[in-house]
Image: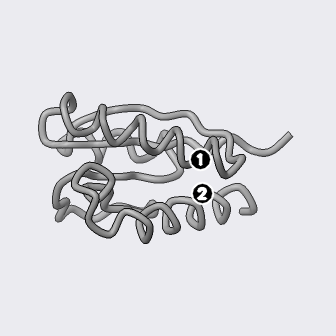
Amino acid sequence: MAKEVKILVACGSGVATSTVAQESVKKICKDAGIPIKVTKGTISEIPNKQNTVDVVMVTTNYRGQIDKPLIKVFGLISGIGKEKIEQEIIATCKAVMEA
């Protein structure tokens, strides 16, 4: 069985945009056949939660330093650059599964 990719989806409040983005990410990965486990959080929780996940996705700018792949996913909500973000999510998750 393929390795499950653990993803943290973070936004400013940890509620609104991360919920929308999380649903999009689940669909993108399901359609690509990538098993994932998604956790939601706030931008301020990233430093503490990054060690429990493989990939961090944010709906807003994050200026901190992290050791994990960071993907800006606001385009999944706005629709701007959506296909490019979907490709980045799939490529990043596949790289994590192969690592």
Residue 40 location (% of width, % of height): 34, 32
Q: Amino acid at mark 2?
A: Cys
**Residue at 31% of width from left, 61% of height from top?**
72
Q: CA distance from mark 2 to mark 1?
A: 8 Å
Q: Residues within 10 Å of mark 1 (few under 14, many from 20)?
A: some
Residue 97 location (% of width, % of height): 71, 55
Q: Residues within 10 Å of mark 2 (few under 14, many from 20)?
A: many
Q: Going by the image, does 44 lie left or right of 3?
A: left
Quarter of the C terminus within the rendering: bottom right
Q: Which residue is mark 2?
A: 93
**Residue at 20% of width from left, 28% of height from top?**
15
The mark total stands at: 2
Q: Which residue is mark 1?
A: 29
Mark 1 lies on a secondary structure that is helix
Q: Say which of 61 and 16 sits in front.
A: 16
**Residue at 27% of width from left, 38% of height from top?**
18
Quarter of the N terminus within the rendering: top right
Q: Nearer the viewer, mark 2 or mark 1?
A: 1
